[in-house]
Amino acid sequence: MVVQWFPGHMAKTRRLITDSLKLVDVVVELVDARLPLSSRNPEIDRIVGNKPRVLILNKSDIADSVANEKWMRFFEKKGICVIAADSLSGKGLKNLDDAIERVLADKFAREKEKGMMRRATKMLVVGIPNVGKSSFINRLSGRAAAKVGDRPGVTTAKQWIRTTGKYELLDTPGILWPKFEDPEVGKRIAFTGGIKDEIMDVEELAFYLIGFLRENYADMLFSRFKIDREEAESIDDFELLELIGKKRGCIVSGGNVDTLRAANLILDEFRAAKIGRITLELP
């Protein structure tokens, strides 16, 4: 499966980010804790350069907790200031203040020496589609300042959001990159909904997801869909997709399984963490 999706507005977003850097003090990059490496756009590194940055492993509440710790250590060893958080509930975001203080320590020290009063810190919020940027902004602002959705492409233009606290936030649309060098990266992003299902072969996508879950989180998969392990071991991944469809009543006339409906069901339940706390890659 080859996954590519690069709408025209994403080329515009690259220019928006480049033009906005001079307006902000720090870049806050959000990634999906279920795929921290695959959900980091390599172009953002190039665009942002040496600008102070904080990395947020967002949606950490639905990622494997053991894997979260491994990823935190991985990025810390690389000298990246990182926190794990869940923007919907706000859990972990209390650590953001300390992170900002660390990455902007020199700037704040210089301003203090000059007798300058502390002004609101300007943040540029970046990340690929569907990593939770709008939820993050709304949590910090305490209001529905940014549109929120569970599908990519909700934010389509640059917008400033002022908070009642110490930050001013500049939101940008999610930006993917023109070509995934590793096809597995595209699959993982598609699993989490970072690429629109409308342009995907959803059945094939669910087939690959089942294969991954079967290999890495079999107990969660079988428990969620009430599948006997011995029965599952005697069938292949597509037959397992059909079995899940049967158990969930995805039947069409003639008694055949509606595999498209079953595929959408599996993807939806994975994305909603109904199968369990799952991480798609490890350091």
Image: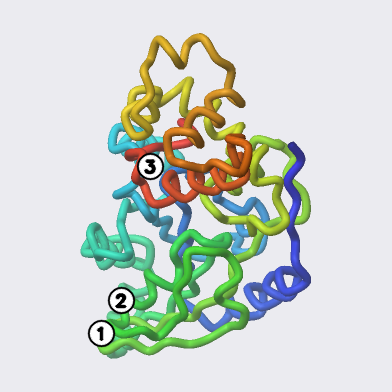
Q: Bin the neighbour count of mark 2 within 10 Å (Cα to Cα): few under 14, some 14-19, many 20 and up.
A: many
Which residue is found at the position 33% from the left and 47% from the top?
62
How is the structure coloured here? rainbow
Nearer to us of marks 3 and 1 is 1
Regarding mark 1 in the picture, which secondary structure is present there?
Answer: loop
Which residue is found at the position 64% from the left and 59% from the top?
196
Q: Which residue is mark 1?
A: 165
C-alpha gap between disc 2 and disc 3: 24 Å
Of the two numbered discs 1 and 2 on the same chain, state the one appearing first in sequence: 2
Residues at circles 1 and 2 in contact by the CB criterion of under 8 Å: yes
Q: Residue furthest front?
A: 254
Nearer to us of marks 1 and 2 is 2
| Residue 33 x %, y % | 41, 47
The front one of 111 and 155 is: 155
Q: Which quarter of the picture shows residue 55?
A: bottom left
Quadrant where the N terminus lies? top right
Q: Which residue is mark 3?
A: 76
Q: Which residue is mark 2?
A: 140
Residues at circles 2 and 3 in contact by the CB criterion of under 8 Å: no
